[in-house]
Image (cartoon, helix red, strand yellow):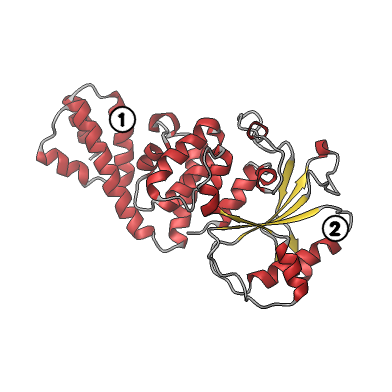
């Protein structure tokens, strides 16, 4: 899965998450901004920064807000945080991490309190050699290594922290986790849904919405949904899955539509079922919207006559 851009969006949407991930955090769960009216960016702002001299691209820098009183310097309670997300084995990662960490204070000499946080899928991932210079070892010992596997095992996990674990949770836990997150933060639909698309590339958008617990009729035509549909399709193309996904979408859309029609119009004939199964995805989506207003088989017959 391509998770880099997804985590970029997560910390753009809720940069205050970083405070709860640092050791010794005094931030209570209710301070994370679970209310959509305070969407988790009261304490920090997120910035993607490139150190151009050496082409070091940091996954993210989280700066304290002006309201903390330490926006440029950081403080023991609200440090400036360099964030990296490393989901794949990379034997050169630790050396690059050390290089860009030492380079950052040169570009920002005003910073007095700096922390480094690295998100990994689990503790078993190999990110560098076991033997390295003592100076690098000292730095790496100060890094906050955050294992998503370990985080996901914590009981009563805050929904915003639970959001971070979606890429590594077992598939049978994704529905409950996604619904818990969106129950507290419905504004994070555009973050949760693209990850579900990546985790379930064979499912249709309607089936993804069922997993997330979102009524399809409420969001079918919203701009947010169109955005995540486009993003999900783009990610699928980038990973070489578009052809299979398109076929799966057509089959899944037909199956969902047929189930709804059988409930609303009664059992369908084999000929009508075959006709609907042969419809392209755009017509299946149009039929799925139209059937909400059907009152019986006559409405279905009229729609098929007008559209096929």
What x and y, as percent, mark residue 108? 85, 58
Residue 217's label in the rendered image is none
In this view, the mark in front (2 or 1): 2
Residue at 34% x, 52% y is: 202
Identify the element where label 1 is drawn.
helix
Q: Earlier in the sequence, mark 2 or mark 1?
A: 2
Q: Is residue 208 above or below residue 185?
A: below
Looking at the picture, tell me which residue is in the foreground, 247 or 131. 131
Q: Quadrant of residue 284?
A: top left
Q: Quadrant of residue 39?
A: top right
Residue 108's label in the rendered image is 2
What x and y, as percent, mark residue 155? 52, 41
Contact, mark 2 vs mark 1 (Cβ under 8 Å):
no
Residue at 68% x, 33% y is: 31
Number of numbered callouts drawn: 2
Q: Would you say 139 lies left or right of 32 here?
A: right
Residue at 17% x, 25% y is: 298
What x and y, as percent, mark residue 67? 81, 36
Q: Which residue, as the protein is rendered here, is positioned at the far left? A: 270
Looking at the picture, tell me which residue is in the foreground, 170 or 285. 170
Distance (Cα) linking label 2 and label 1: 58 Å
* Image quarter of the C terminus: top left
Q: Is residue 201 above or below residue 192?
A: below
Q: Quadrant of residue 270?
A: top left
What x and y, as percent, mark residue 281? 31, 46
Q: Would you say 27 lies left or right of 1 here?
A: right
Q: Which residue is mark 1?
A: 290
Looking at the picture, tell me which residue is in the foreground, 286 or 235. 235
Q: Which residue, as the protein is rendered here, is positioned at the far right? A: 110
Residue at 39% x, 49% y is: 171
Q: Is residue 265 above or below residue 98?
A: above
Q: Can residue 248 be seen in the rendering of this structure? A: yes
């Amino acid at each position: 899965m391509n998770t880099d851009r997804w985590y970029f969006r997560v910390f753009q949407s809720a940069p205050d998450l970083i405070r709860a991930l640092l050791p010794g955090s005094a931030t209570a769960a209710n301070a994370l901004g679970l209310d959509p009216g305070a969407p988790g960016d009261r304490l920090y702002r997120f910035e993607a920064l490139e150190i151009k001299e050496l082409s070091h691209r940091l996954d993210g820098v989280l700066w304290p807000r002006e309201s903390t009183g330490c926006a440029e310097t950081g403080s023991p309670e609200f440090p400036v945080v360099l964030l990296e997300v490393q989901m794949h084995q990379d034997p050169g990662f630790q050396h690059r991490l050390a290089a860009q960490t030492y380079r950052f204070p040169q570009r920002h000499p005003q910073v007095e309190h700096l922390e480094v946080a690295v998100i990994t899928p689990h503790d078993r991932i190999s990110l560098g050699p076991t033997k390295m210079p003592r100076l690098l070892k000292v730095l790496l010992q100060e890094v906050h290594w955050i294992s998503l596997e370990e985080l996901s095992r914590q009981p009563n996990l805050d929904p915003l922290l639970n959001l971070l674990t979606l890429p590594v949770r077992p598939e049978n836990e994704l529905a409950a986790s996604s619904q818990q997150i969106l129950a507290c933060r419905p504004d994070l639909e555009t973050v949760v849904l693209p990850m579900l698309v990546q985790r379930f590339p064979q499912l249709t958008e309607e089936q993804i919405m069922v997993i997330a617990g979102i009524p399809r009729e409420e969001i079918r035509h919203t701009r947010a949904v169109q955005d995540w549909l486009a993003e999900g399709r783009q990610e699928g193309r980038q990973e070489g899955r578009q052809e299979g996904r398109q076929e799966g979408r057509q089959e899944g859309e037909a199956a969902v539509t047929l189930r709804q029609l059988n409930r609303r119009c009664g059992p369908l004939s084999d000929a009508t079922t075959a006709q609907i199964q042969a419809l392209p995805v755009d017509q299946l989506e149009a039929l799925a919207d139209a059937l909400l207003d059907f009152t019986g088989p006559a409405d279905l017959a009229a729609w098929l006559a007008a559209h096929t």
